[in-house]
Amino acid sequence: MSLSIDLNCDMGESFGPWVMGNDSEVLPLITSANIACGFHAGDPSIMRKTVAAAIGNGVALGAHPGLPDLAGFGRRNMDITPQQAYDIVVVQVGALAAVAASQGARLNHVKAHGALYNMAVRDPALARAIAQAVHDTDKSLVFYALASSDMARIASEVGLNVAHEVFADRSYQPDGSLTPRSHANAMIEDPQQSIRQVLRMVTEGKVTAVDGTDVEVRADTLCIHGDQPGAVVFAKAIRAACEQAGIEVKRVAPALSAA
C-alpha cells in the first residue's frame, strides 16, 4: 500500500488591516486549508477572500473554530462548559459553510484551533461536545484530531470520519501531546529536523518525544503552522521531501475511516 499524507495549514487569520501569515505563498504548497471563522481571528471579508483563494488553488476547505479571544489569538485557555463549546463550534462551522456555499463550494473538514484544540485533547467531555457539534452541523465532515489521542477516539465514537493529525513544527511529550508553547523547545525551527520528524511519522508511525522515547502516532494529515516565521520555506521543503520519499501528497477524503 502506497503512503500518502495531507498537508494542512491554518489560514485566514488576518483581521481587518492586521495581517497574519503568508497565505498566498503557502496555499499552492498545501492540500487542505483550515480557515479561521472570526472568533480567534479572521473576519467576514477575510473569510470570503480566503475561501476564494483556496478554491482557486484546488485546496480543500476546512473550518477552524476557536475560542472567542481575538486579543489572545485563541491561544489562552478559557473556562467554558461543553455546552458553550458546542455552541461556538456550531456557529463557526455554520458561518464558514455559508461562505463556502456562496462560492459554490462545500467544507471538507473541521479542525479546532489553538487552546480549544489542546483543551479538548485533555478533556473528554469537551472533545465530545466539539465532535458532536461538527456531527450535528454536517456529519460528512472529516474531523481533524491529535493523532492517536482520546480526542480522535471520541470523534470516531460520535460517528465522524477522523483524520489523525501530526505536526511538522512542534515537539512532542512522552504521552503523545504537544509540548506547550510556553516551553522553550515547543517549536521546531530547523527545516531539516522537521523533515526528519515528518518522514519518520509517516513511514514508521513513530515520533521521538522530548525525553528521547518513541511515541506511536498515526499520520493522516500533517499541520504546518502558517503563522510561524519561515512557513513558506518549511512547506516547500516538507512537500519536496515527502514527494522525494515516494509519499503522495493529497487531501483527506471524507470517506476516510477512523480507527
Image (cartoon, grey):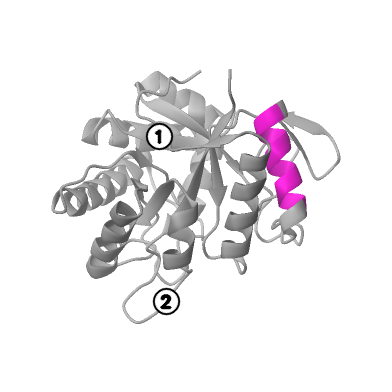
Residue 19: mark: 2
Q: Position of residue 176 (x, y in %)?
A: 68, 35
Q: Is residue 123 visible?
A: no
Amino acid on which disc 2 is placed: Val
Query: Height in image: 206 above or below 38?
Result: above
The secondary element bearing badge 2 is classed as: loop
Q: Is residue 109 above or below residue 236?
A: above
CA distance for labels 2 and 1: 27 Å
Indicate left or right for 103 with 220 as reference.
Answer: left
> What residue would you read off at disc 1?
143
**How far across and how far down the image is residue 65, in percent?**
36, 51
Q: Nearer the viewer, residue 165 or 1?
A: 1
Which secondary structure is most common in the magenta stretch? helix
Residue 129 placement, left or right of 2: left
Q: At numbered mark 1, what does the secondary structure look like: helix, strand or loop?
A: strand
Q: Find out whether residue 67 is within the magenta segment.
A: no
At label 1, the amino acid type is: Phe
